[in-house]
Image: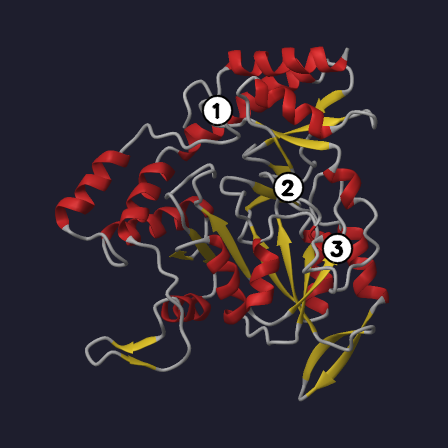
Amino acid sequence: MKKNFLSIHEPVFIGNEKKYLKDCINDGWVSTSGKYIDSFEKKLEKFTNTKFVVCLNSCTSALHLSLKLLNISANDEIIVPSITFVSPINSVLYNSSYPVFMDCDKFCNIDVDKTINFLKSQTITKTKNGSDFTINKVSKRIVAAIIIVHTFGNSANIYELVKICRDKNIKIIEDAAEGLGSYNVYKKRKYHLGTIGDLGCVSFNGNKIVTSGGGGAILTNNKLLFNKAKHISNQSKSNQIYSKHNMVGYNYRINNIQAALGLAQIENINFFIKNKKLINEKYKYYINRINKFSIMNSPHYSISNNWINILELNVKKLKINKIFKIFSKKNIQTRSIWYPNHLHPYLKKFQSYHIDNAMRVFQSKICLPSSSNLKISDIKKISEILKKIST
């Protein structure tokens, strides 16, 4: 990182990172086999209360592989939110499937009410060979799955969608790339994000709460899907000695060096979460008292890891571009949330359903520095800049 530069989210190394990495190099286990892969997966299983975890080279790979594991076909449709990092949409396109875009709520997550309305009013159920299929009235294609993205550490209102998806035989994939250490609260119980749907995906990118430099994982309680994920992610190798393969596979495995880094990181995840909660509280203390600005809250059904703190602009005349420039001159990184995906030129041809909130949300929210080692003095500095902007 640049000296005296305050980034959105930088990795924090305070544990066994160097020790484990040195061990990998000394032992020579630096590729896609090694003890740290197994240890990292076991640690993730315990932390997320999931029966099975498959670590991969990215969350994008995890999303793409999830579509394959659930037998989502080319020409099937997948419901996706417009406000999200582009990864889940590209994963749908890798599969030669069709995204159907949904609007967002005030927490930047998929608008559950509009999604339910779409499923009730714009689809019909047909039975073929004893199985029910949900058909889009407009396109006549099968609506096979929904990718529910949990943004910025906040849970989407997923349980509102579970019943209707089960009734309509629609698979649920959770994109919990930003949600390691976050939970959904339902009927007074908490469930780690990524463990509620049919499959869940998490990320260990360099900017996440736990990083392996790059990487991701699939979470599942289904042993058959776990075994299939292990197989397909390893080029579908059916015989190690004779190098035989029995189906199309992918080179999606994580390597031992990445897993060693990830293991050292997750050993300190509770410390990171504790710090991030304090950072969020301090942001709210200093910024919520400033006219024109506030910090986005979490919904009541979410226990957030507070991955990124989102600044809300409460006055329409404030322009985010101007704010970006002011912070940039102070060596402080800020950025917008994601541009609504349904408006990207290469994605405009796909169906979107009553999206009238996404652009307004995009234009009124800013990502603030949120590293787990962020100092209170940094938060005070940011708040002082915002005070000057508000006057």
Amino acid beneath label 1? Asn
Image height check: is 213 above or below 346? above
- The answer to the question of whether label 2 and label 1 lie on touching residues, with beta carbons closer than 8 A, is no
Q: Earlier in the sequence, mark 3 or mark 2?
A: 3
Question: Where, quadrant-wise, is the C terminus in this rendering?
Answer: top right
Relative depth, front residue between 165 and 360: 360
Relative horizontal placement of residue 68, taking residue 85 as reference (left or right): left
Residue at 43%, 45% (x, y): give it. Answer: 204
Relative horizontal placement of residue 290, taking residue 220 as reference (left or right): right
- The answer to the question of whether label 3 and label 1 lie on touching residues, with beta carbons closer than 8 A, is no
Q: Which residue is mark 3?
A: 102
Residue at 42%, 39% (x, y): give it. Answer: 210
Q: Which residue is mark 2?
A: 188
Q: CA distance from mark 3 to mark 1?
A: 33 Å
Amino acid beneath label 3? Met
Residue at 57%, 52% (x, y): give it. Answer: 175
Decide if residue 197 is in sight here.
no
Image height check: is 74 above or below 3? below
Image height check: is 166 above or below 188? below
Q: Nearer the viewer, mark 3 or mark 2?
A: 3
Q: Which residue is mark 1?
A: 275
Mark 3: few, some, or many residues within 10 Å (few <14, many ≥20)?
Answer: many
Location of residue 264 by image quarter? top left
Callout count? 3
* Residue 184: image location, x then y, percent: 61, 44
